[in-house]
Image (tube, grey):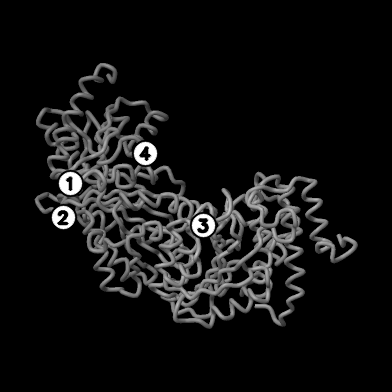
């Protein structure tokens, strides 16, 4: 197994979106065709570093997400590499048809950044806690869907997106998340990585939930359960090989995401395993319901999205299916 | 851009485009009739006089760009492109058929020269604005981005989001043309969703608005020339056209928005177009 070079100390925290802000600035310095546009959330989505450095390559469209993505399709048509940001609830939430027609069907390399995804948005409540973006974007042909696990990976993902010729969507979270990957941790669009090796159960996680999955694996280890944690930074195209290898080994799969499981990562993994390797599985995520106001930590606990809930689900899966699996 | 301006030649071209629009729609058995017929004069002016383009090199990097935001009017664009030499004329009879490059609504990846994929309304002006902004960033002055929008699609909020954006950044190389034919699927625009005062609306949004007869080729060409000379604001040309223009029983009837002529209707329409409404006694086929 390749060395993952995770950090030893996970105490440092930073919002994942901050890594995007740094990555965009670097991408802009590396390639003059990288341009950016925002719908009145420049600092919130961390585009302000780019906007300050390259005012002539930054476009503020106002609160107009439909215009944001269609204008970007026009920029891309002329050879630009446009990054466009808003909250995920509005982009791709509000402008999905425009993305479908002018970016996906039209195959233009627009980079759509949806910040503030998941219930960990917190006090803003259900309207702003985007949960359906993975399902919406995963269904679009040509579209790449990326959900980095921390700010360090988000920075790498942004640089990779600037070089990718396809339409891309990247979902980001608002809250500070522990930084556990390092500059040496591998990242490539389309690749899944085994962040922790195990034998009894595979926890396949994406975005903010990869950290929770790693913490859950520690809790499980104290109960003599060996959990493998597979990080899915690219939800589409899905790295089938890594998932099938892990599922084939452990015969128990638990998915974890801060999104609706219907159409989300849980849906994607269930589709894969259902067709190629039927495996006992459970899905951690939002189960056909909306979020609500509250502090991120209490919401993650309430909606059973934290490490404890993942560990509990893992034990249930193992208890319910041990006889079938062996 | 064409050399000597011969309006009567462009008018004949527009008539020939109408003939082929009727032929292809009748053969397709479905599609939109009124809009394409109304736009034939503008497309004749664009493809055979105004646009800087090369049908043999659709990706020529100095070409002007034409976005057809109201993608349902694509039959008129397909015919104009075939007449200009983008593809063999007989191919127009494949419109809307399985395997055709001429999809029911235009798809860029299928047919070189289309510039974008359109049909769902309201997104053409913002795409064109993005293209013109890219030209502005690169300091390109000798290329123009034209976008044709329908009047009905101005019901879409996306259209006005783009109008505000273009007025804010004023990319000099953008020219919008509104096909003001007063009809949409459910009826006259003013009863479905009133647009008037349309010129005042554009002016209030920070645009310079010209109003012309969009079936007068000379007026179309001079409006575009004037638009190019106006640099302080983006320019919209509100082109009043007659939906179904050239075919008496289709003109100004909203029911012809989204249907194709049957064999009998096509025969009647072609006779009228080929005799120029009785001005010519015998048909020249």
- Label 4: which residue? A241
- Looking at the image, tell me whether mark 1 or mark 2 is earlier in sequence order: 2
Of residues A186 and A318, the one drawn nearer to the viewer in this rendering: A318
Of residues A207 and A214, the one drawn nearer to the viewer in this rendering: A207
Q: Are marks 1 and 4 in contact (CB under 8 Å)?
A: no
Percent of width and height locating residue A64: 36, 59
Residue in the image at 79% along x and 60% along y: B273
- Asked whether residue A22 is in view, the answer is no
Q: Is residue B170 left or right of residue B35?
A: left
The N terminus of chain A lies in quadrant: top left
Using the numbered discs, state the Cα–Cα distance from disc 3 to disc 4 in whole angstroms.
Answer: 46 Å
Give a yes or no on whether discs 2 and 4 share a subunit: yes
Of residues B94 and A124, the one drawn nearer to the viewer in this rendering: A124
Q: Chain of mark 3?
A: B
User: Considering the numbered disc 2 on the image, is that residue within a helix, a strand or a loop?
Assistant: strand
Using the numbered discs, state the Cα–Cα distance from disc 2 to disc 3 in whole angstroms.
Answer: 44 Å
- Label 3: which residue? B153
- Label 2: which residue? A14
Percent of width and height locating residue A115: 27, 53
- Looking at the image, tell me whether mark 1 or mark 4 is earlier in sequence order: 1
Q: Residues within 10 Å of mark 4 (few under 14, many from 20)?
A: few
């Amino acid at each position: 197994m390749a060395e993952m070079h995770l950090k030893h100390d996970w105490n440092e925290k930073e919002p994942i979106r901050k890594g995007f802000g740094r990555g965009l600035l670097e991408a802009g310095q590396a390639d003059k065709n990288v341009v950016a546009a925002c719908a009145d959330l420049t600092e919130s989505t961390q585009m302000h570093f780019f906007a300050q450095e390259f005012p002539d390559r930054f476009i503020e469209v106002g609160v107009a997400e439909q215009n944001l993505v269609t204008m970007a399709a026009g920029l891309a048509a002329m050879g630009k590499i446009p990054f466009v940001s808003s909250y995920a609830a509005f982009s791709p939430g509000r402008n999905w048809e425009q993305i479908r027609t002018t970016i996906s069907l039209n195959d233009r390399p627009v980079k759509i950044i949806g910040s503030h995804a998941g219930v960990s948005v917190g006090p803003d409540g259900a309207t702003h806690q985007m949960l359906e973006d993975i399902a919406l974007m995963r269904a679009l042909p040509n579209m790449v869907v990326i959900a980095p696990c921390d700010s360090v990976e988000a920075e790498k993902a942004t640089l990779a997106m600037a070089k990718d010729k396809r339409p891309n969507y990247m979902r980001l979270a608002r809250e500070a998340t522990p930084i556990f990957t390092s500059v040496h941790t591998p990242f490539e669009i389309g690749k899944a990585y085994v962040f922790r090796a195990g034998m009894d159960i595979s926890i396949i996680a994406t975005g903010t939930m990869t950290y929770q999955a790693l913490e859950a694996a520690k809790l499980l280890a104290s109960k003599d359960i060996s959990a493998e944690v597979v990080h899915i930074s690219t939800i589409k195209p899905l790295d089938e090989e890594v998932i099938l290898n892990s599922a084939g080994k452990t015969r128990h799969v638990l998915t974890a995401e801060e999104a609706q499981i219907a159409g989300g990562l849980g849906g994607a993994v269930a589709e894969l395993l259902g067709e190629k390797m039927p495996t006992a599985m459970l899905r951690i995520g939002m189960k056909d319901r909306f979020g609500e106001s509250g502090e991120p930590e209490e919401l993650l606990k309430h909606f059973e999205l934290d490490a404890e809930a993942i560990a509990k689900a893992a034990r249930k899966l193992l208890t319910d299916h041990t006889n079938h699996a062996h | 851009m064409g050399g000597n301006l011969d309006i009567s030649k462009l008018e004949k071209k527009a008539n020939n485009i109408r003939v082929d629009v009727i032929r292809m729609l009748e053969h397709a058995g479905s599609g939109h009739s009124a809009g394409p017929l109304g736009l034939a004069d503008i497309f004749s002016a664009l493809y055979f006089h105004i646009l800087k383009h090369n049908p043999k090199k659709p990706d020529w990097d100095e070409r002007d760009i034409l976005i057809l935001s109201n993608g349902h009017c694509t039959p008129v664009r397909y015919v104009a492109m075939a007449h200009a030499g983008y593809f063999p004329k007989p191919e127009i009879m494949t419109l809307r058929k399985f395997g055709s490059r001429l999809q029911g609504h235009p798809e860029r990846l299928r047919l070189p020269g289309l510039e974008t994929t359109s049909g769902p309304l309201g997104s053409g002006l913002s795409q064109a604005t993005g293209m013109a902004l890219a030209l502005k960033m690169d300091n390109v002055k000798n290329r123009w981005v034209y976008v044709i929008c329908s009047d009905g699609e101005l019901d879409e909020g996306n259209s006005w989001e783009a109008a505000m954006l273009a007025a804010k950044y004023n990319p000099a190389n953008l020219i919008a043309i509104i096909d003001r034919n007063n009809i949409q699927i459910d009826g006259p625009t003013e009863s479905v969703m009133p647009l008037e005062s349309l010129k005042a609306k554009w002016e209030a949004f920070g645009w310079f608005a010209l109003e012309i007869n969009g079936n007068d080729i000379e007026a179309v060409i001079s409006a575009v020339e004037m638009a190019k000379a106006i640099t302080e604001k983006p320019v919209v040309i509100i082109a009043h056209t007659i939906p179904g223009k050239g075919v008496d029983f289709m003109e100004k009837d909203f029911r012809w928005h989204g249907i194709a002529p049957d064999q009998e209707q096509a025969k009647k329409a072609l006779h009228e177009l080929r005799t120029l409404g009785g001005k010519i006694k015998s048909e020249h086929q």
